[in-house]
Image (cartoon, grey):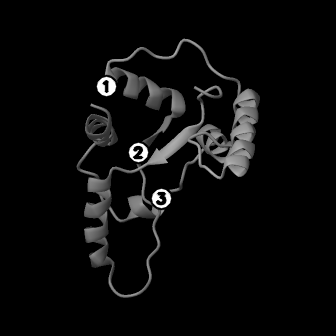
Amino acid sequence: MVGDGRNRKSMGYVRNLTLFMAKTIECGRGVHVFNYADQPDLTANELIAFASRQMGTPLPAWRIPYFIGLLGGYFFDGLSKLTHRDYPISSIRIRKFCANTQVNADRLKATGFAAPYALEDGLQRMIRSEFT
């Protein structure tokens, strides 16, 4: 875990997204722009705790301070340039992980769309599919 984990993340379950896209047919002709996100937005701490429970693994006992994680990301950026290989750690990934990535989904709410699946259901399915 890098950072304090209080940053919020907007996410959407793909089944809800596809159902919403089908609903947008009712919007009629023209261009309609929406940000899609299932609510509530979760913090990085909540996401990691949820994933740990689903995978049956303990939460990490320690955290890497943001500035040390970012320095590590810069190290791997340099190593990537030298070796011409991509690494799973980079400064951009560290910054993105520690940033608030919330979107305003007010226009989505105004359509009256009610997501039939809970975000937690989608996360659970994804974890089961990818990691078990």
Instruction: Name the residue that disc number 2 marks.
Output: 39
The earlier-in-sequence mark between 1 and 2 is 2
10, above or below 45, in the image: below
Residue 31 screen position, x and y as percent: 44, 82
Residue pictured at 27% horizontal, 39% vertical: 121
The answer to whether marks 1 and 2 mark residues whose Cβ atoms lie closer than 8 Å is no
Three-letter residue code for mark 1: Gln
The one nearer the camera, 59 or 82, is 82
Residue 89 screen position, x and y as percent: 61, 39
Q: Is 29 on the left or on the right of 100, as rendered?
A: left
Residue pictured at 69% horizontal, 31% vertical: 69
Instruction: Name the residue that disc number 3 marks.
Output: 106
Instruction: Name the residue that disc number 1 marks.
Output: 54
Residue at the far front in the pictured view = 83
2, above or below 38, in the image: above
Q: Could you say whether the residue bearing mark 3 is in a helix, strand or loop?
A: helix
The earlier-in-sequence mark between 1 and 3 is 1
The one nearer the camera, 35 or 93, is 93
